[in-house]
Image (spheres, rainbow, N blue to C red):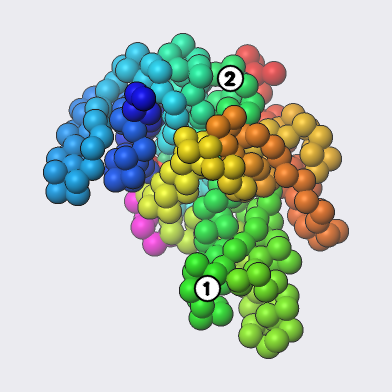
Amino acid sequence: MARKKIALIGAGNIGGTLAHLAAQKELGDIVLFDVVEGVPQGKALDLAQCGPVEGFDASIVGTNDYKDIAGADVIIVTAGVPRKPGMSRDDLLGINLKVMKAVGEGIRDNAPNAFVICITNPLDAMVWALREFSGLPANKVVGMAGVLDSARFSTFLAWEFGVSIRDVNTFVLGGHGDTMVPVVEYSTVNGIPVPDLIKMGLSTKERMDEIVARTRNGGGEIVGLLKTGSAFYAPAASGIAMAEAYLNDQKRILPCAAFVSGEYGVSDLYVGVPVLIGAGGVEKVIEIEIDAEAKAGLQVSVDAVKELLVACKAIDGSLG
Ligand code: APR
């Protein structure tokens, strides 16, 4: 069987980390694309030279030509400009929308059968625009946010309870950003719901509110510390988990920005919901029952995404 091909559009901090992780896991051969000449080639060369040390078998090539992504099985998009301190994800809208147009057309013309994972922010709007510009089926274009958001939530909960991260399972819904909805009721430590742990006196409602707020601001906290860029290790690890779910037909249930058609009472946009990812791409949107508070939170998220889509359409008349 031929090796799988992974194309990474954007060879910046996340793109480079994605390439390294994909190579270490031998997910397939890797093409690193960027508009800046020399950067994808240089990173590819550096990463290829990790091979003998780490013992992985993967070809890693850098390019500035979309033709080299032809036949890719998975494409992960991080092309764009990351947030600077003080800049909201939404400030990025205009700049990154133009990038999505170029990337979407590059995918449409060269690798229309790929499973595409978008990471570029503002995520919920960019993944929608990427689907529009690429013309791919909605089940083959998905956004990475929830895996990262729930990883952040899990990290903080493991610290709070003083338990292994392996036993923590968290659940988030909604947009990537201030409107995300970490659902405490569906978050567990080895199956024990967090509200029960609070009843057992292991934490308090107030601490949980603080942890939820910290999760919502998870990206901003890191931007504030780094000062010259945004998070990249955990975003890359999250993107790879989604790629593996598709490549290995794992049928994983992961929170992703997925296209909804009536689920949760929402249609025609991308929003963070649990989905089943397997060889068919997004095979199913899982619709769980949520309480009134989570529903209201999800609505705030949806309204924020809708506003961004209106702004996208105003910037680029070819969109919907
Ligand atoms: N096509 C391809 N690559 C592009 C394009 C384009 N039109 N425009 C910019 N790029 C490249 C840049 O040259 C850069 O190498 O995208 C890369 C982005 O890398 P970084 O600036 O290091 O950003 P990174 O930290 O990887 O984040 C990428 O993910 O989390 C989001 O908000 C973040 O949108 C940002 C994206």
- For label 2, count other residues whose C-alpha is less than 10 Å away and answer few (under 14), some (14-19) or many (20+): many
Viewer can see residue 54: yes
Q: Quadrant of the N terminus?
A: top left
- Amino acid marked by disc 2: Leu
**Foreground of the two, 200 or 318:** 200
Q: Main secondary structure of the magenta part?
A: helix
Q: Are marks 2 and 1 in contact (CB under 8 Å)?
A: no
For mark 1, what is the residue? Answer: 158
Q: Which tag, 2 or 1, sits closer to the chain's start? A: 2
For mark 2, what is the residue? Answer: 136
Magenta highlight on residue 80: no
Splitting the image into 4 quarters, where does residue 266 fall? Answer: top right
- Amino acid marked by disc 1: Ala
State the mark number for residue 250: none
Asked whether mark 2 lies closer than 8 Å to ligand 1, one says no
Query: Which residue appears at 85% of the width and 59% of the height?
Result: 292
Magenta highlight range? 224-228
**Foreground of the two, 88 or 34:** 34
